[in-house]
Image (spheres, grey):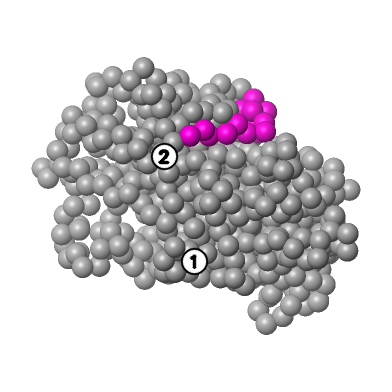
Amino acid sequence: MNQLPPAPPLRDGALVNPDQDTLTADVVIIGSGMGGGTLAWALKDAGLDVLIVERGQFLPREPENSQPDHVFIKKRYVTSKPWYDAKTGQPFQPGVYYWVGGNTKMYGACLPRFRRSDFEEVAHHDGISPAWPFSYDDLERCYAQAEELFEVHGALGEDPTEPVHSTPYPFPPLSHEPAIERFAVRLRQQGLHPFHMPNGMHLPSMAERRADTTADGSPSATGNKSDAENRAVRPALESPTVRLLLGAYVQRLHASPDGHTVTAAEAQVGERAIRIEGKTFVVSGGAVNSAALLMRSVSHQHSSGLGNSSGLLGRNYMVHNSTFFLALNPARRNDTAWQKTLGMNDWYQAGPDTPYPLGNLQMLGKLRAPMIKAARSWAPTWSLKMVTDRSLDIYLTTEDLPRPDNRLTVDGDKIMINWTPNNVTPHRELVKRVSRAVRKAGYPIVLTERMGIATNSHMCGTAVAGTDPARSVLDPNCRSHDVKNLYLVDSSFFPSSAALNPALTIAANALRVAPTIAASSR
């Protein structure tokens, strides 16, 4: 890469200098990822004093952004401490990142809408996926707005499971490169329905694709990726009513004596303790960290965690059943630069030959030798390069179901995850069907690995929303049933996980609840 484009300059006064012991705002948003960043953008013209509190810093734009050895082997951008498997006590490195923009700095920018059925009660192999407290139709206009905000590229009419859109995609789909187009043709010849995966990558030329080849799982130095920093947070900070506090780890929230409101957040900025007061507090630190913050915020009125009268806070943790799938034809090289252009949902819903939903197929960003070397340190790099130069790389996801015993607990700042996969039988069937289709498409060698507890980028469900306070943590507008000025707008509120990337749904929901939050903060 030659000259890197600089990040846009920030408005004077956009960054808070924490030289005071107490900060105040109308709306305090904890976390600047897809939920918090989008909410800040939605409130920028509401006439409210909005303070975004971010644990990390701005991720630097630098040549190392697109160098897989720095990202995957040297782990240059890893910022989180290990979490712990509650069953074994062993630590693992979670897929969470503390930067402005949150996990979207590292995501592959796949931005699909959930299907209409994902908001309804659905029978699965291992049980019921519960209905959401609002419908697809309730969210549809917000999906359209989120697609506009995050500059989504896509095409209607290709995927039979695609729900109704009130507007077309803002941008045409990213074209398949030759290897992926050939794969799509071979799938269609089998009667399947591959489609152009909705994507938030703006790559109008092949040169720009080459510059962002590793932007799935790593940052994009070009600014082409629609992450929450460059599409939501920075535009929000152009407003004089939105400010950003960096490097602030919120340790707990303090409640009023009657327990009905949050009065302040207690944050650590370097060596200093900061008190942040506000009218409304919105937690958006990711499904685990948001729940963990509320669990640390115990008081006389909230002895088992803030807003936890249902006892469900931290429970129903979901992360998807997922498999990394490599298809190989030793005689065929794959020189695709940006591979995440194809998806397939032929087995997403039950049908005549599918008694229960199986899940989604989408492409991984093109794997490179250092990415696999990070997990297979014993393998010679030259052999891994031979494989990845010829591999077609696929990601398979199947819905896992909410289970109260799948949960997190906290011990101070230490996070423990208790997770037992469920609904695994349909995932195995999905792998089997995709293996058969891939071989028919001309790739005789199939290598698969099912992901474990550390692959948690799609985590959700730790503070589920619903109408019954005894069976949910949040109301349908993502406000705490117990604490009237407390909201959660990340994936914590998801009653079910669906089997698709959650990012666009998080953004659309933040846009949906923004007017309610604005009204309650005046």
What stretch of residues is rendered in magenta?
127-142
Nearer-the-camera pick, 74 or 419: 419
Confirm whether the magenta stretch covers residue 224: no
On screen, residue 160 above or below 316: above
Cα gap from disc 1 to disc 2, whole angstroms: 24 Å
Residue under the image location 49 percent in, 58 percent down: 418
Confirm whether the magenta stretch covers residue 136: yes
Q: Is residue 227 left or right of residue 449?
A: right
**Can you identify the residue that label 1 sits on?**
83
In the image, farthest residue toward the bottom? 271
Q: What secondary structure is found at the residue carrying circle 2?
A: loop
Which amino acid, mark 1? Trp
- Residue 339 image point, x, y percent: 34, 43
Which amino acid, mark 2? Asn
Can residue 360 be seen in the rendering of this structure? Answer: yes
Nearer-the-camera pick, 139 or 468: 468
Nearer-the-camera pick, 498 or 165: 498
Residue under the image location 77 percent in, 60 percent down: 302
On screen, residue 52 above or below 186: below
Can residue 7 be seen in the rendering of this structure? Answer: no
Nearer-the-camera pick, 26 or 469: 469
- Residue 485 image point, x, y percent: 81, 52
Q: What secondary structure is found at the residue carrying circle 1?
A: strand
Crowding at label 2, few (<14), some or many (≥20) Cα neighbours within 10 Å?
Answer: some
**Can you identify the residue that label 2 sits on?**
423
On screen, residue 127 above or below 299: above
Q: Is residue 118 left or right of residue 29?
A: left
